[in-house]
Amino acid sequence: MKRVTLVAAMLVLAAPTAARTQETPTERDAARDVVQKQMGLQRSLNIDAVVAKLTGANPARDAVAARAKELMDKELIALGDDITKHPEVGFVETRSVQVLTDYLKQHDFDVTMGVGELKTAFVARYNKSTPGPNLGVILEYDALRGTKGAFHGDQHSTQGPIGIAAAIAVAEFLTRTKTPGTVVVFGTPGEEMMPPNAKTVMFDAGTFKGMDILVRSHAVNATTRPAPGFGTCCMNIDGVKYTFYGAPAHQLTAWNGRNALEAVIHLFNNIDAIRSNLRPETRIQGVITEGGAAPNVVPDKTAADFYIRYPDEVYLAQVTEMVNNAAKAAALATGTQVKIDHYGRNRDGIGVGSLDEVAFAYMKKYGATGVVPEPGKPMGYEETGSVSSNIPGVGFSAKSSNASNHTYEMEADALTDVGHSGFVVDAQAMAALLYDFATRADYRALVKKEFDTLKGLHDEYLESLRKVYVTPKVTGERVVP
Ligand SMILES: [Zn+2]
């Protein structure tokens, strides 16, 4: 997915950092107290001083970062190139997973394949660790679905090599110096697809349980980091599928059937009819995925797939209920039945300043180009929010392309110097931050304090939104049972 596409828009907003957490006037009103508390938190943490202390001279840390670079230069850039040239879309990334897990096994990781129905998910644990802080690295490897076939226009092909370089470098350091700490690599499939929402499935299955930090890289065309706080890149999303069931009949005697295509058309019309009663930030878009098979047979099964979006999850729940009602009304009007499947949801994640600012400083230190000095909008380090609102973590986004995300040009850049140099920066910065987190109890405590406080503030924010979004009172006699 796409972080950078929104950077330009974000920079236009000159509001103070914390205020950008909210996207609508209603949200800003409801969040006034929370924003004050959040700004107070950021001041009290004195993150600039933390960054200066951690990123100063430190030969031991530089050696860990240098090991990550060595692994990239010797083998892992080539491995990334290989995956770029063999793209596989979500949930069938078998070849990519094979080469990544083979490499992990050669470097003392024990690999467990599959989580639930997710055949191309995996968990790889470094087998020489001693118990201590649990460091997790999230990898993705799915390609985009293109009209010419799969392609790596989002450079997920290199996330595996980057994360593996950092994981091995820090794991070797911990073992060599007998420093407590475990390193676990999580292979998370199908980032570009839902259903299923792979990271949510894995989180619900307890896959990330016990992790003290999670790190992840993602390709971008500028070196960026989010502001601290809670939010998403692209609004909270409900993914909902509506399947209508009717009865078949000959076209000329259609009264012998019930038309599921008419039902799905009614659904779209019903939604359009209520748009003016929905807050203007609402985005509802859907496609008809099944519309019948032949013109001379009344369609007895149709389906539509919707992404319903709103900046916050509280009002989104109201919107989704109205769309569900639009589907029920469509079924009622056409004598059909509707099955409603809530198959996926993306929610706010939490961006931790004490992690994001250190990561940003390390990316610059190791030579990142195209640096955007201002922080972007607050968001978590992964797209679902399931993981990033529950476990502290950080994303690394050093510039690795001259083109925007999801393009053939970004895929081409993965094989050239702009890509390779950005990937090496990500690997070094990731290794350096994991080194700091593993070796400094005071840093771990600070990160935990910031994360826990932000999580509490997010709950408080949602609570105040629940008071704001009252539903209008509709009076009159109820004539439909
Ligand atoms: Zn992506």
Image (cartoon, helix red, strand yellow):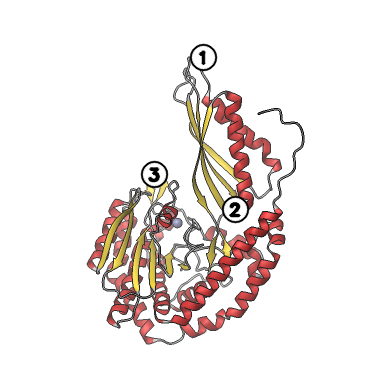
The numbered disc on residue 256 is 1
Position of residue 324 measured from the top left corner of the image (x, y, whole percent): 58, 38
Q: Residue at x 56, y 79 (%)?
A: 47
Q: Residues within 10 Å of mark 2 (few under 14, many from 20)?
A: many
Residue bearing the label numbered 2: 313
Position of residue 289 measured from the top left corner of the image (x, y, whole percent): 48, 35
| Left or right: 67, with 46 as reference point | left
**Residue at disc 3, CB closer than 8 Å to ligand 1:** no
Q: CA distance from mark 2 to mark 1?
A: 43 Å
**What amino acid is found at the position of numbered circle 1 in the picture?**
Asn
Say if 336 sits above or below 403 in the image.
Answer: above
- Nearer the observer, disc 2 or disc 3? 2
**What amino acid is found at the position of numbered circle 3 in the picture?**
Lys
Which badge, 2 or 3, comes first in the chain's sequence?
Answer: 3
Say if 170 sits above or below 262 in the image.
Answer: below
Which badge, 3 or 1, comes first in the chain's sequence?
Answer: 3
Residue bearing the label numbered 3: 148
Quadrant, the C terminus: top right
**Residue at disc 1, CB closer than 8 Å to ligand 1:** no
Query: Regarding ligand 1, which quadrant of the image does it lie in?
Result: bottom left
Q: Secondary structure at mark 3?
A: loop
How many callouts does the rendering have? 3
Position of residue 309 measured from the top left corner of the image (x, y, whole percent): 58, 49
Q: Residues within 10 Å of mark 3 (few under 14, many from 20)?
A: few
Q: CA distance from mark 3 to mark 1?
A: 43 Å
Position of residue 346 measured from the top left corner of the image (x, y, whole percent): 52, 53
Q: Residues within 10 Å of mark 1 (few under 14, many from 20)?
A: few
Observer-nearest residue: 254 or 420? 254
**Residue ranking furthest to the left:** 106
